[in-house]
Amino acid sequence: MIVRSRAPFYVFVFLLIAAGISIATWRHIELGVPWMTGEQRPVWMIEARVDFEGLNEAAQVSLHIPEQPPGFSILTEQAASPGYGFSVLETSASRRAEWTKREVSGPQTLYFKVQFVPEESATESALTRKPRPTPAFWEEPQATAVRELLRQATERSSSPESLTRELIQLLQPDSRTQNTTLLVSDDNYLQLLVHMLNHTGIPARTADGLKLEDARRRQQLMPFLQIHNGERWLTFDPRTAEQGVPENLLLWRQGAESLLDVIGGGNSQVSFSMLRQTVPALQLATLEANQKGLGVLGFYQLPIEEQSMFRMLLLLPLGALIVAFMRIVIGIRTSGTFMPVLIAVAFVQTTLVPGLIAFLSVVAIGLVLRGYLSSLNLLLVSRISALIILVIFITAGLSIIGYQMGFNTGMTVTFFPMVIIAWTIERMSILWEEEGAREVLAQGSGSLFVAICAYLVMSTSLASHLTFNFPELHLVVLGVILLMGQYTGYKLSELRRFTPMKVYD
Amino acid sequence: MDWISPGKLKKLGILNMNRRNVGYIGRYNERSSFPLVDNKLKTKLAVSEYGVKTPKLLQIVRQQHEISHFRELSADLDGFAIKPAKGSGGKGITVIVGRDEDNFVKASGVRISVAMLERHLTNILAGLYSLAGTPDVAIIESLVQSSPALAKFSFQGVPDIRIIIFQGYPVMAMLRLATKASDGKANLHQGAVGVGLNLSTGRSLNAVQFNRPITLHPDTGLPLENIKIDGWEDMLEMASRCYEATGLGYMGVDLVVDANEGPLLLELNARPGLAIQMANGEGLLPRLTNIEALKRPHFSPRERVHYAMEAFGKH
């Protein structure tokens, strides 16, 4: 007796299933493909509006646009500005949207729309090289005041972060001393802070943030302070000394670049309006995957026609799984192993009840005609061929009659695989002659039952969603089918078949 | 609905379909040996070298045009059987027992014309009854004259004896009797009666039809309790020799007892059914594991038969 070890087989099946599940999980986490259908994700639609007066000359408008704001990622960008040339210029330091026009006069309005997706994973800003602090100079008596303030702050702190916090505290109106009132005025507060920090050797800069609230219009950017601690830029609220970027804050501008430059125009200003939108999570994932170049791993980049074909094709393994289960574990007899799956696929296109009626009527009429063919004493191949042609006639006839009677569903008969139906009719009729109507009924209804079960599973939106968006889950299906091939237990039908054995117990 | 629990089935040692396919047919039957048993013509040639007799071959119809010769041959024949060489489960077998003027009389008494038989031959050649639908040949064999001792139990048709041979050891046997419901055929799923046989004596144990226990033959009305097969040991040995001839570790051997020729091999089956367990009122598994556990298998068919008669006889 040959006893082959089953261990490698089970390890292999386990690996298959594990690979399927882990790739699917990776796809869910990394690409954000949702497990369920109809899942929605919030998206912020932000519109920057630039207004300026044209001065009857060539105009160039350059708006700073965010590249990678902490906590968000950019989904789409779009500019609306009729008559203007538009381009996005990317340099190492910044990204700028640039509008240009030869002759501009009167009030002008330009729009730039960006969709942002909140992302928890992207909160940490990237490591950067420490920039050189830019030295600042003060005249007396300000220089003495600055030195005094910095001395106080340095005494009370231990690190660039704490020094920044202390300095902000010292400059607040309620804690002001003589020194600070000398230095601080309303409009130079933030610049003063930046200069002072640079003076102590801490690189500092300003940033502009936008507070996200649903359906706000004409919002202005709020200034923030950023210092470099040697590893990365840290953001501080210059009013409260709070460190970090609040959840609903979008940093539109970071760094020394100006927000808006207008050449050939005057009286320019930027305002922002925002809207909280929801987008199907799947659509989001598709867009993101394509942007990251990961779309290659799915079907999203295929032409739509091929995509819908794959949608259908990828349902077949589920049908095969159900047939395997029904035959191996339940023990239902079907005529032709995978005929039920093909019928189920046709049902998916026709929907159940019309499909069932069409299928049954085609097979019934076919059986009657087959009865006549059998009396002609034909060779098998030509008999099947004749039957295929007859089946096509029947389906055509049913479609036309159905259409004339006003049932569009009559047309759906054409979805059935003709050759399969012809073989089904042939097998059924042989079965009828040899084993009687009972067996025909048993196998026919068994096949239909399995087909309906397969249809019910395949037609759920979840099934088509999972099989199409997580094709790797088919590895799991494969693993389960392989495992079922090892099932040596009793079938459900055998528990009934062997019932008379009870008396020998 | 009446059910039996899986635990009870396990206790009885009932072999089930999945286990038979994976654990016995898949493990012990070489794929390459299947054509030997799936093709009756090849079976005949293979077993003849091992002294196993089969019904006399009258004609082989291989091509469509050879069907015309069938008419000439059949002119002087009274009884014969037409079989597809690659048929399974008795499909496509037509047994002719006599003539009525120009028509032939089937075992069931139905009269059919030569034209209908020719059509049947055409169907066989086209592969209608062959396992994979491949083109087939038809063989025409002389009719088995069943020994009267057994024939009286069967309603028409020839009673045959199915013996399961596992690695050359007979492990279970049953007598199959045709009924009206089975149309003279000896296939249990078509309604034939299965009578379990005591492996050491060749005496009947239980009888079932359509999986239900019975005590009388439904058509002949004869009691099925005290049937005894003559020359039992020789039959077992003959069946056991088929193992050497085919190399199949798990198979069903179908024998008939001819009044003149003695036991004849009707066909071999590489996928024998499970109903034999019901006819015997016993599961196959304990016997199969008994053989599997043998440390030193016996080499000659006679030794194997003796071992099996000793080990599996009911007392």
Image (tube, helix red, strand yellow):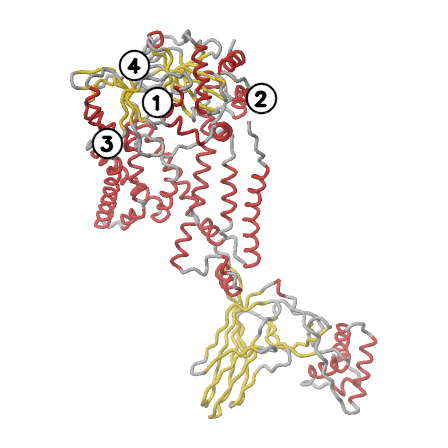
Q: Chain of mark 1?
A: B
Secondary element under disc 1, as helix, strand or loop, is helix
In this orientation, which residue lies closer to the viewer: B99 or B1? B99
Q: Is residue A399 above or below residue A204?
A: above
Q: Which numbered marker is on residue B156?
A: 4
Q: Which residue is mark 3?
A: B64
Q: Which mark is residue B293?
A: 2
Chain name for mark 2: B
- Return the x and y of residue B100 as percentages of the image width and height: 18, 16
- Work out whether disc 4 and disc 2 sit on a shared chain: yes
Crowding at dot 2, Cα within 10 Å, few <14 / some 14-19 / many 20+, comes out as few
Residue beneath the point at 52% across and 53% down = A35
Query: Which callout, 2 or 3, points to the residue nearer the camera?
Result: 3
Q: Specify the farthest residue to the front.
A: B49
Q: Earlier in the sequence, mark 2 or mark 3?
A: 3
Q: Nearer the viewer, mark 1 or mark 2?
A: 2
Q: Earlier in the sequence, mark 1 or mark 4?
A: 4
Q: Is residue A427 left or right of residue B51?
A: left
User: Where is mark 1, residue-wise?
Assistant: B190
**The residue under label 2 is which amino acid type?**
Ala
